[in-house]
Amino acid sequence: MRIFSLSVAVVALTVATAPVRAADAIPDFVTAAVADKDRPKDDTDRDADRKPAAIMALTGVKPGDRAVDVGPGKTGYYTRIMSRIVGANGKVFMFNPTWVAEKFPAVKEGPAAFAAAGFSNVEGSIQPMDEIKFDKPVDLVFVSQLYHDQVWQKIDIAKMNKAIFDALKPGGVYFIIDHSGPGVTTVEQIDKLHRIDADLVKTQVLAAGFKLEAESDLLRNPADPKTVIVFDPSIRGKTDQFIYKFRKPK
């Protein structure tokens, strides 16, 4: 099901117990964070495709939380929104995997830029993806369009998911968004298309001990042929994407 208006439409969300009406579930603090007048135009221009209010509502991130934005690059589209949501009593880790920082050194400048702009609750972190850890457990690990990259980078996926499991509080959320690639499971296929089979991701994460709480078609696009690389001008920014919300058991 597609969203046409967040104020009235239902986000199709499959949950273990019952469907959730995301329009009813978007808290005021999420709405305010997305509406922040200081958000750059480059970010707000992407909102129609990314639907950040609904996405943040689905994660359950809230004031006071410790959230990890994995792979935010230098500019941190989601980092900025999460920072406003968690507020002064929370923290957002702007986490770039070591291999990303090596390939794109400019990402190292992101945390300082956020600090200079007054985002005192944002902290930079660069670590190997399969050794992710923090000073104390976190509430949310958020991975948007980067899970597949760990595969073609030949990161130990089982070790990575276990490290994320250990980094989360009991009851913490592991939230994954990625480009859909049915049948795309090998390193070579993923490297070629920058897509991944959704069922493969689900199987890998469940094997780490997580429970699947929800999946959403909020970012689905049936017009995506799913056979071209995600950077192709015909589909870039509008790929068919799957969303999984996993939770660490309490």
Image (cartoon, helix red, strand yellow):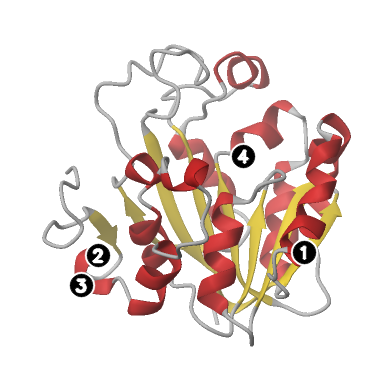
Residue, x 37% and y 29% (percent of image)? 238
Using the image as rendered, state which of residue 157 and residue 145 is in the foreground.
145
Say which amino acid is labelled 1: Ala
Using the image as rendered, state which of residue 92 and residue 47 is in the foreground.
47
Residue 95, image x and y in percent?
74, 55
Report helix, strand or loop for mark 3: helix
Q: Are marks 2 and 3 in contact (CB under 8 Å)?
A: yes
Residue 180, image x and y in percent?
43, 30
Give me the C-alpha separation between circle 1 and circle 4.
27 Å
Give me the C-alpha separation between circle 2 and circle 4.
24 Å
**Which residue carries the number 4 mark?**
146
Q: Nearer the viewer, mark 1 or mark 4?
A: 1
Report helix, strand or loop for mark 1: helix
**Which residue carries the number 2 mark?**
22
Say which amino acid is labelled 2: Ala
**Which residue carries the number 1 mark?**
116
Judge the density around disc 1: few (<14), some (14-19), many (≥20) Cα neighbours within 10 Å: few
Q: Earlier in the sequence, mark 3 or mark 1?
A: 3
Residue 105, image x and y in percent?
86, 37
Count the marks: 4
Give me the C-alpha separation between circle 2 and circle 3.
5 Å
Say which amino acid is labelled 4: Leu
Report helix, strand or loop for mark 2: helix
Q: Are marks 3 and 1 in contact (CB under 8 Å)?
A: no
Residue 247, image x and y in percent?
51, 68
**Which residue carries the number 3 mark?**
24
In the picture, measured across the screen, residue 72 lies left or right of residue 51, that is right
